[in-house]
Amino acid sequence: MTKAETFGTLLDEMRATAPLVQCITNYVAMNIAANVLLAAGGSPAMVHAQEEAGEFAGFAGALTVNIGTLSPTWVDGMKAAIGGAVAARRPWVLDPVAHFATGFRRKVTADLLALGPTVVRGNASEIIALAGGVSSARGVDSRDPVEQAEEAARWLAHKQRCIVAVTGATDLVTDGNRATRIEGGSPLMPKVTALGCSLTCLVGAYAAIRPQDPFGATVAALTHFAVAGEQAGKQSPGPGSFAVGFLDLLAEVDGVMLDKLARVVRL
Ligand SMILES: Nc1ncnc2c1ncn2[C@@H]1O[C@H](COP(=O)(O)OP(=O)(O)OP(=O)(O)O)[C@@H](O)[C@H]1O
Ligand SMILES: Cc1ncsc1CCO
Ligand SMILES: [Mg+2]
């Protein structure tokens, strides 16, 4: 981000541009992720078949790849899409859902990481395990605090030469040298499935408008989520109404509100 830019100006620009984001996500996330992206201001397209994924990535603003409900044919689509995005010099974001759980997931994740994601976004357990650490998580839900993942995130970002975003009660974004903490959100967020997967797609939307600054783009996306989540949490008695209210708040937050309510700390 340049000096004159704020998260708010980035949000307004993202919404005005409505970047086309190719989302290869899981069966659980597909609907909510598309709705999240639309509410926030982007334009999602769930395109994953190997026959067309590479071609589509050539004109999408960004690509996001999520391994939540893997199968071999989807992996072919992911690799084709990544090839298309890299050839077109578009940013791509990897969400390594429960990558530690099985041999198949570990192998696919290693293959995808080797293709050079622009951003990796995961929960604390996923990022700790990606850096070779030990986590007690067995499935898609995190069992570790974000603070415990900071060293792992910095190490991974350095090794992969990418941006790493760790989410949880507070979020952390690092490029291996710089790191930023984002506060906000709601304890109801992990009680609604696939909000992390949806956030990965929103990171794609911001990266599409700032391909030269994926660090700033990632912090902006997480800040948009944190502010909308915090406000929605104040109005929601439980996960069901939160899911609906959160979509409303993602759309309601504008640049001025984002800059007023953002709690972002440079570490
Ligand atoms: N306890 C919490 N308090 C506030 N915000 C939270 C909390 N837990 C998660 N969040 C927020 O929820 C969003 C999703 O992060 P989370 O770490 O739950 O992703 P995830 O585990 O990958 O989710 P999923 O796999 O279900 O998509 C982020 O914006 C994060 O800041
Ligand atoms: C519940 C679930 N299972 C595979 S992916 C997914 C969505 C949250 O990551
Ligand atoms: Mg996840």
Image (spheres, rainbow, N blue to C red):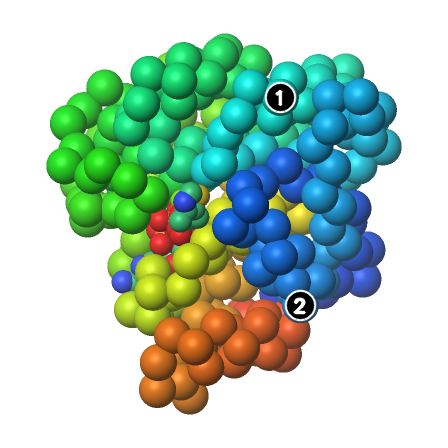
Task: Identify residue type, mark 2.
Answer: Ala
3D distance between C-alphas at marks 1 and 2: 30 Å
The one nearer the camera, 253 or 193, is 193
Q: Position of residue 127 (x, y in %)?
A: 31, 33
Instruction: Tell me which numbered mark, 1 or 2, is placed earlier along the sequence.
Output: 2
Quadrant assignment, res 55: top right
Badge 2 element? helix
The one nearer the camera, 243 or 92, is 243
Q: Quadrant of ligand 3?
A: top left
Ligand 1 contact, mark 2 (Cβ < 8 Å): no
Task: Identify residue type, mark 1.
Answer: Thr
Mark 1 surroundings within 10 Å by alpha-carbon count, few (fewer than 14), some (14 through 19), many (20 or more):
few
Please give the residue where the numbered disc 1 appears in the rendered image: 73
Q: Is residue 1 visible?
A: no
Depth-wise, is mark 1 or mark 2 nearer the camera?
1
Q: Position of residue 258 (x, y in %)?
A: 55, 71
Q: Tell me what residue is drawn at x 75 percent, y 46 percent.
A: 45
Q: Is residue 229 visible?
A: yes
Q: Tell me what residue is drawn at x 67 percent, y 48 percent.
A: 205
Above or below: residue 187 compared with residue 193 = below
Q: Which mark is residue 39?
A: 2
Badge 1 element? helix
Q: Tell me what residue is drawn at x 67 percent, y 23 percent.
A: 77
Q: Position of residue 80 (x, y in %)?
A: 71, 18
